[in-house]
Image (cartoon, rainbow, N blue to C red):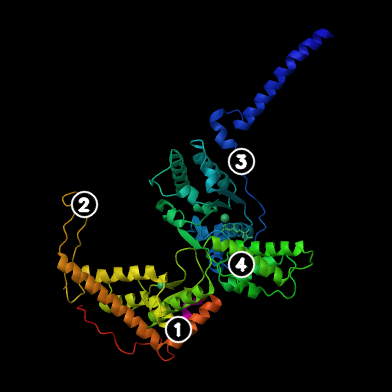
Amino acid sequence: PPVLLRLFSWMLPIGVMILFWVWMMRRMGGGHGVMAFGKSKYKLHGENDVITRFVDVAGVDEAKTELVEVVDYLKNPGRYGKLGARIPKGVLLVGPPGTGKTLLARAVAGEAHVPFFTLSGADFVELFVGVGASRVRDLFEQAQKNAPCIVFIDELDALGKARGGPGGMGGNDEREQTLNQLLVQMDGFDPATGVVILAATNRPEFLDAALLRAGRFDRQVLVDRPDRAGRQAILEVHAAKVQLAPDVDLDQVAARTPGFVGADLANLLNEAALLAARRDAEQVSSADLELAIDRIVAGLEKKNRLINPHEKRVVAYHEAGHAVVSSCVQGADPVQKVSIVPRGLGALGITWHAPTEDRYLMTVSELQGKIAVLLGGRAAELVFFGEASTGAANDLARATEAARAMVVEYGMSELLGPVRLRPERRAFLPGMEGYERGEYGDRVADQIDTEVRRLVDEALERARRLLLERRDRVERLAELLLEQETVSGDEVRRLVCDEAAPRAAESAPATSPLAG
Ligand code: ADP
Ligand code: MG
Ligand code: ZN
């Protein structure tokens, strides 16, 4: 009947509009009004059966050993609670991009068979004020309901940037609120519930100090670039997924890829497989791998991350120089590890020292020894290559600083005597705030410079002499470094020290024209 038809054609659009409106409200927050939309738009659900295991992550054994404890705790939180042992609430994974931090966090969840809640730092920082903070609250609520479980905050630096810095516009406030909420939540929850918070960052220096305080991310795990053995292990993990020809030698591939991280190596095998597929081959040959390496190396070189073989030699001898000098001078901290794994733009190699004890006092000869160790790298360059390189800039800065402190702060120079020599503090002009008259004039300033220079010169000469006398040992250590990229402190001592004495003594004691 026409009446019904007329009525229907009039009501249908209205009905559609009502349905549409209800649907909109649902999306925006289940009818609680506009203010609730931050909460419901973002549904967090934990991933329940993570299949990643520790065997999928290779070449980062030190990080894994630290995380085994977390897995054990998640498996039986009760036992730890009974003993009163306090497991760290937060563990921060620190390392360059692509080294497997995200992978490790998943592996912890997989090994412990617990749900895995993940959010990236960037997810918190939203356009709408207050959304980030409410997400943090949601995240912790959800996690506590699902304990034991893991909460993983990826790219924490996006959220945890130090407060009070020169901020952007407006968005900074929002991030600060979110960060504060995170701090409040981390303090508020009881670790006995079995929630462990993992976070990852590749820029720990940007993190707000409050995040690193006890009871928050108080444990930091370094996920470093892999050395040669580590790269081989990673290649083996990923090689399981591709058909490799029998002539492929993964050890050789590892040797050719210094500076590659796990993600680069995974990418390498994938590229090689693509090349093989393009030429219709059954298996990935070593020629495919060579070509893929060349491609990726070219890409990385653009990013300035790889060093050429000659540079690598210089770095190896430089680091060997530090290590050998430090095992010969009295009072130097023992070498823990020497490494020439390239790590970004700054440091090319590194020699780690384990401090023997907390030091409050250092004697003149120990300070001289320290300066000699700092200059050991430069000395080795001079001895073995006949010329200096730019690789020692940071060493020189630290050596000079130490020598200057000996003269002006500790009164260890005979020429200037046991006095403190405060330099002039320049603000802008004399008379302005912050300006402090120096305690000495130009003549003394010249003397200070001469003394500093003398201390540094002597230390360099001493390091050179030590290395010249131990040429063969430095060479042995440097060659070992070139082969393995990292050498442990024990190996260094085995190579460098005389069998009889645990620490090789210097042939002649350094003359000490210093008062002390
Ligand atoms: P990050 O979070 O440190 O930037 P990811 O964990 O996201 O690095 O790593 C990216 C990919 O690279 C991983 O999915 C994995 O395929 C590979 N990868 C990285 N590191 C490793 C490693 N140590 N062992 C095995 N594979 C790795
Ligand atoms: Mg990651
Ligand atoms: Zn150095």
Is the residue under label 3 in contact with that under label 4 (CB below 8 Å)?
A: no
Marks 3 and 1, how far apart at CA? 59 Å
Between circles 1 and 4, the one closer to the viewer is 1
Residue 104 lies, with reference to residue 325, above or below; the image says above
Q: Amino acid at mark 2?
A: Gly
Q: Which mark is residue 474?
A: 1
Q: Amino acid at mark 3?
A: Lys
Q: Which residue is nearer to you in this view: 466 or 450?
A: 450
Residue 382 spot, x, y in % from top left: 39, 80
Which segment did they paint magenta?
A: 487-493
Tell me which label, 1 or 2, sits earlier in the chain: 2
Residue 479 lies, with reference to residue 190, above or below; the image says below
Q: Which mark is residue 58?
A: 4
Marks 1 and 2, how far apart at CA? 49 Å
* Quadrant in the picture for residue 114: bottom right
Residue 71 spot, x, y in % from top left: 58, 61
Marks 3 and 2, how far apart at CA? 54 Å
Ligand 1 within 8 angstroms of badge 4 C-beta: yes
Q: Which residue in the protein does label 2 denote?
A: 434
Tell me which label, 4 or 3, sits earlier in the chain: 3
Residue 229 lies, with reference to residue 12, above or below; the image says below
